């Protein structure tokens, strides 16, 4: 089974400091999305990202057409809006969809810094939207950690656990538009791994991270120098990434060619 990530657009209301995406307002044509999905029957899990898929006017139709092909969907969102009609999709459509809320802050002040926003009230909107979506969809929180939000991570983990939503913690990779992100030092990374291991045990599986497993990720090796010990999906040719401009890469976190 292969994993296909398609970033369907290059527009987003947020401006996360580490974001690899070139937010140039591009839009991957819908027929191109289906052509890529249909090009290989091994693509069973389709990851939909952007930009922001939830502000894309085509999103409901894209979901319906991909679920009609019996594909499982993992939709990644910053959570600022819930598209009209999303909460009314049928049980049959919903059962194959996982929604990932990307939340890298536990409060409005840090939200303003990380997502480069003037107004912090959107943070509360994101949490309200998460509470609505999790009632009907399998939901997970994904947090990207870099220097500015490291100290807030325990609060983000508390927030996720209080909402009863599993959290996945990934380090930031210096690629594409996020190439200048301030990475964690190796000392901070060691401390973080200790913290994550304890949390994984204490929180009974609610907290997960590639940083506490044997590293098989080329992006982690490239960014943090942690040796790569086993094959990753790129080595097995079981992953493909398509940008909003239709560019094809092996992985968005390794060889993303954005600006
Ligand atoms: C590019 S976003 C697109 C979808 C949606 N806007 C969102 O934030 O979930 C997809 C995921 O990539 C993560 N991401 C973006 N740039 C990254 C980077 N340089 N390193 C690690 N993760 C990154 C985001 O945190 C998010 O979880
Ligand atoms: S990571 Fe997602 S929410 Fe943040 S700026 Fe990039 S596309 Fe937008």
Image (spheres, rainbow, N blue to C red):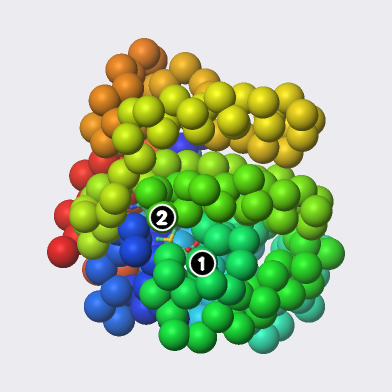
Vertical comparison of 74 with 135: above or below: above
CA gap, disc 2 to disc 1?
A: 9 Å
- Residue drawn 44% across the image and 85% down it: 118
Residue at the far top: name it: 229
| Residue in the foreground of this view, choosing between 11 and 44 | 11
Task: Say which element carries label 1.
Answer: helix
Residue at the disc numbered 2:
148
- Residue drawn 61% across the image and 67% down it: 107
Image location of residue 135, percent across then percent down: 83, 64
Image location of residue 200, percent across then percent down: 68, 29
Circle 1 residues within 10 Å: few <14, some 14–19, many ≥20: some
Task: Say which element carries label 2.
Answer: helix
Q: Quadrant of the C terminus?
A: bottom left
Q: Earlier in the sequence, mark 2 or mark 1?
A: 1
- Residue drawn 42% across the image and 31% down it: 189
Image location of residue 152, percent across then percent down: 56, 52
| Residue in the foreground of this view, choosing between 48 and 76 | 76
Q: Which picture quadrant has residue 226?
A: top left
Q: Which picture quadrant has residue 250?
A: top left
Give left or right: position of 162 versus 151. Answer: right
Circle 2 residues within 10 Å: few <14, some 14–19, many ≥20: some
Image location of residue 45, percent across then percent down: 54, 46
Instruction: State the mark number for residue 51.
Output: none
Vertical comparison of 155 with 122: above or below: above
- Residue drawn 43% across the image and 70% down it: 113
Could you tell me if the residues under marks 2 and 1 are in contact, i.e. CB atoms within 8 Å?
Answer: yes
Say if residue 253 shows up in the picture: no
Residue at the disc numbered 1:
110
Badge count:
2
């Amino acid at each position: 089974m292969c994993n296909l990530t398609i970033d369907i657009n290059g527009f987003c209301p947020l401006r996360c400091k580490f974001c690899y995406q070139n937010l140039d307002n591009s839009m991957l044509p819908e027929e191109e999305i289906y052509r890529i999905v249909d090009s290989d029957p091994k693509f069973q899990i389709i990851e939909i990202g952007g930009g922001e898929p939830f502000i894309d006017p085509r999103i409901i139709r894209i979901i319906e057409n991909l679920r009609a092909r019996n594909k499982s969907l993992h939709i990644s969102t910053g959570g600022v809006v819930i598209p009209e009609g999303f909460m009314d999709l049928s049980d049959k459509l919903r059962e194959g969809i996982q929604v990932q809320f990307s939340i890298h802050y536990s409060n409005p002040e840090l939200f303003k810094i990380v997502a480069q926003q003037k107004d912090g009230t959107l943070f509360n909107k994101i949490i309200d939207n998460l509470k609505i979506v999790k009632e009907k969809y399998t939901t997970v929180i994904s947090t990207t950690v870099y220097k500015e939000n490291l100290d807030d991570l325990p609060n983000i983990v508390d927030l996720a656990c209080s909402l009863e939503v599993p959290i996945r913690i990934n380090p930031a990779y210096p690629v594409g538009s996020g190439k200048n992100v301030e990475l964690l030092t190796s000392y901070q990374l060691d401390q973080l791994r200790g913290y994550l291991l304890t949390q994984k045990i204490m929180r009974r599986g609610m907290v997960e991270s590639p940083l506490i497993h044997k590293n098989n990720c080329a992006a982690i090796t490239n960014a943090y120098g942690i040796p790569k010990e086993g094959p990753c999906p790129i080595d097995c040719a079981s992953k493909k990434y398509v940008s909003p401009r239709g560019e094809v890469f092996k992985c968005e976190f390794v060889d993303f060619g954005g600006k």
